[in-house]
């Protein structure tokens, strides 16, 4: 059974664990079985005495269980949480980033409470996204702000004057992945972005995405030189804009915006997705490309039957009270 979201897939966690940490954490899997297959909650400890966390980090845009959670009955959730509670560090559990309206999250919270945990959600980041209506890219593009549309049009004209340019989109293992990865890394190294903390993660993700059918790696080349590169991941009717970069010094050509528009057209008209997701952050430019915003949250669970749990819960509640008082005093 395919996962609801690619960030809930075994393939995602395999690449994250293999290439996504500068220091390897201690990883665990809490498991509950259903007639449709096993449900696994990937967890970890970053330090031997540390609390238990989601198997996620700065590379993770969303977190959730692997497997058919819709087939997990109440006793299954009881078994899963009991197994979680038996793991080292489980007096304090922190999971993030999460979809606040996910059904599995509500079920997990209910069972954690039933087994003596204090539960609190907290804000992680804003998430801009675009539902795709009938009419595909043409309808979507007609609704974008005129400054954005004009910027892309000017960029195309300036690229035409600058020389020969094209956009290549790698989608599978049949494409030359070595060349696509080299182009992506060349652009990234010449962009404004900081060096990747884990150099093997992105090549690993690109190859994983190609194997799983998620890959949409776009590269804009001018006179054969790659100027902009973007990694989009398509799964389950959703296109995720995962990474983007362009070479500094060529901003007037708007290569990044031209490439975004081309990939947007591809996922809407060729892949026929129902949603495009800009994933992490409230960057101002995202509101030009996306019509809707939601929030991703985190979950703190503290076992009130253990002293580490009630101490963490007390600190959390006190911290929230202090921030609330400070906010009231600031706005008074």
Image: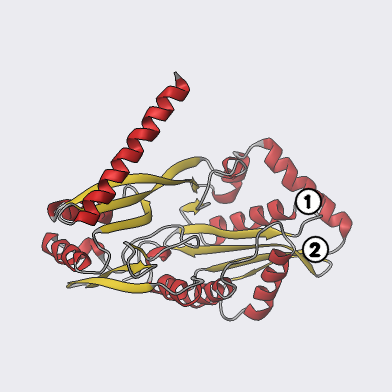
The nearer-to-camera label among 2 and 1 is: 1
Work out which residue is located at the far top of the displayed protein and give it.
332
**Residue with the mark numbered 2:** 165
Work out whether residue 283 or residue 228 is closer to the camera in this orientation and state it.
283
Q: Please provide percent x and percent y for residue 69.
A: 25, 63
* Residue 167 seen in the figure: no
Place residue 268 in its image quadrant. bottom right
Helix, strand, or loop for circle 2?
strand
Q: Are marks 2 and 1 in contact (CB under 8 Å)?
A: no
Q: Residues within 10 Å of mark 2 (few under 14, many from 20)?
A: some
**Residue with the mark numbered 1:** 251
- Looking at the image, how many numbered discs can be counted on the residues? 2
Figure quadrant of the N terminus: bottom left
Tell me if residue 90 comes above or below residue 141 in the rendering: below
Place residue 319 in its image quadrant. top left
Q: Give the residue at x 35% y 66%.
A: 3
Q: Please provide percent x and percent y for residue 17.
A: 43, 74
Asked whether, in this view, residue 283 is left or right of residue 168, the answer is: left
Distance Cα–Cα, label 2 vs label 1: 15 Å
Q: Please provide percent x and percent y for residue 87.
A: 23, 69
* Residue 4 seen in the figure: yes
């Amino acid at each position: 059974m395919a996962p609801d979201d690619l960030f809930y897939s075994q393939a995602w966690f395999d690449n994250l664990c293999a290439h996504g940490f500068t220091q390897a954490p201690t990883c665990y899997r809490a498991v509950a079985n259903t007639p449709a297959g096993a449900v696994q909650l990937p967890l970890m400890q970053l330090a031997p005495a540390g609390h238990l966390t989601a198997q996620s980090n700065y590379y993770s845009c969303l977190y959730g269980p692997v497997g058919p959670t819709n087939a997990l009955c109440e006793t299954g959730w009881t078994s899963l949480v009991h197994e979680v509670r038996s793991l080292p560090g489980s007096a304090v559990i922190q999971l993030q980033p999460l979809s606040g309206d996910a059904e599995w999250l509500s079920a997990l919270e209910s069972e954690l409470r039933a087994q003596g945990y204090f539960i609190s959600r907290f804000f992680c980041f804003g998430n801009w996204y675009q539902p795709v209506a009938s009419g595909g890219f043409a309808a979507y593009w007609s609704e974008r702000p005129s400054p954005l549309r004009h910027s892309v049009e000017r960029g195309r004209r300036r690229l035409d004057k600058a020389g020969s340019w094209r956009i290549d989109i790698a989608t599978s293992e049949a494409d030359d992945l070595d060349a696509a990865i080299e182009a992506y890394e060349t652009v990234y190294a010449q962009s404004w972005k900081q060096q990747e903390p884990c150099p093997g993660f992105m090549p690993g993700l690109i190859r994983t995405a190609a194997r799983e059918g998620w890959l949409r790696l776009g590269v804009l080349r001018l006179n054969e030189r790659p100027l902009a590169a973007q990694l989009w991941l398509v799964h389950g009717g959703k296109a995720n804009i995962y990474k983007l970069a362009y070479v500094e010094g060529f901003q007037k050509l708007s290569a990044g915006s031209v490439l975004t528009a081309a990939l947007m057209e591809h996922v809407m008209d060729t892949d026929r997705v129902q949603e495009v997701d800009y994933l992490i952050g409230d960057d101002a430019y995202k509101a030009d490309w996306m019509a809707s915003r939601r929030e991703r949250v985190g979950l703190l669970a503290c076992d009130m039957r253990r002293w580490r749990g009630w101490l963490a819960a007390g600190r959390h509640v006190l911290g929230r009270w202090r921030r609330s008082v400070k906010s009231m005093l600031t706005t008074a």
